[in-house]
Amino acid sequence: MKSVVINAGGSVTLEEKPLPQITHGDDVLVEVSCSGLCGSDIPRIFHNGAHFYPITLGHEFSGRIKKMGANVTDLNINDLVSCVPLQPCFNCSECHRQLWSQCKNYQFIGSRSNGGNCEYIVVPYKNLFRLPEGTTPTEGAFFEPMTVSLHTIQLAGGCKDKEVIIIGAGTIGLLAMQCAKALGARSVTAIDINPERLELSKKLVADYVYNSAEMTTDVIKSSLDERRFDQLILETAGSPQTVELAIKIAGPQAQIGLIGTLHQDLNLKSDTFGLILRMELRILGSWMNYSGQWPGVEWKQATQLFMQGKIDLPSLIAIKGSPQEYVEAVDALQGNPMNGKIVLDFSQE
């Protein structure tokens, strides 16, 4: 079978690998349909950030069931499924409290083990989410990234009738905007430094857009003051500057959901830190996308939003290509962020 392999030093190759085999009663053989490149994969590819090399990445994928172990009774051959990549132990104190992302002994498909950037993969049935009739393979590959922001919204107690401000209009941010609007946000605001992303944000659902490269923080704050109450700010860009921006523009008792992962130290000036106290800000750390009965309410929410036609995916996808086209697109990044989602599509073979 074809597999996209990442080697140390940023080498991306398309290789032939043996077909994986079911070895346990809980195993399921999945024929992969679509797999998305996550922003977190870029340092794994280009900056020696993977747990081991060579590795096949891919934790955002969908596919169809081709074979099942003897213990699997609630899935059927040819069911379309989405990967639930976290592998909690289900036995520790955190797991008993359904704090899946806090599991002390977790594994992770496509990061701590090989993932779905290959034609076939064997995974435990607990790591598969059966998709309803009418869901497309492309939608299935977006369940995992979409539930990331849904988890933060869940931690914030929902977003209905809130002024939702999203800093960072990449894939996670654009999905978050659409989710917030569909879940009843009073308004949706997008902040980014890329004019094209801001234009897309407005085309999709954003009521207001601000270019933080062209506008001062004070100007943005002044404009937002008209909508300064009941704010939920989602920081998805993952830079010290955008975290600081989130704090400085926040209204009284605003919630700030931190989604983006920092790769540089965050050093706040005392007056910026003081705003957290003076404005009584609610800082929410958000990690992964699981809460409640496994795999979590976020996955059910994502199902509903897709079935209701609330999520526009084509506008988010830059490249949807065959394995060779995918390899070329990833290699061309050379460590830079994606400008639109790159999706591996095995149906083109």
Image (cartoon, grey):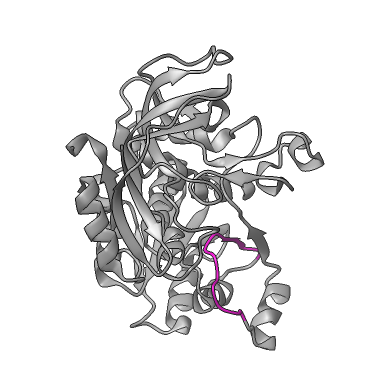
| Quadrant housing the N terminus | top left
Asked where in the image residue 286 lies, by quadrant, the reply is bottom right
Residue 262: in magenta span: yes
Is 75 displayed left or right of 34 in the figure? right
Is 299 displayed left or right of 96 in the figure? left
Magenta stretch secondary structure, dominant: loop
Q: Position of residue 273 (x, y in %)?
A: 68, 80
Q: Report the residue at 20% width, 47% height from top.
A: 321
Q: In the figure, 130 relative to 347: above or below?
A: above
Residue 254: in magenta span: yes
Q: In the figure, 41 relative to 217: above or below?
A: above
The answer to whether one can see residue 174 in this image is no
Q: Looking at the picture, tell me which residue is in the foreground, 248 or 236.
A: 236
Asked where in the image residue 266 lies, by quadrant, the reply is bottom right
Asked where in the image residue 189 lies, by quadrant, the reply is bottom left
The residue furthest right is 93
Q: In the figure, 333 relative to 314: above or below?
A: below
Is 122 displayed left or right of 99 in the figure? left
Q: Position of residue 203 (x, y in %)?
A: 25, 55
The answer to whether one can see residue 193 in this image is yes
Q: Looking at the picture, tell me which residue is in the foreground, 301 or 26.
A: 26
Q: Report the residue at 18% width, 37% height from top.
A: 349
Q: How many numbered circles are shown?
A: 0
Q: Looking at the picture, tell me which residue is in the foreground, 154 or 344.
A: 344
Q: Position of residue 67 (x, y in %)?
A: 42, 19
Q: Report the residue at 58% width, 33% height from top.
A: 295
Q: Report the residue at 59% width, 34% height from top.
A: 296
Q: Position of residue 126 (x, y in %)?
A: 57, 28
Is 349 displayed left or right of 172 in the figure? left
- The stretch of residues the image draws in magenta is 253-266
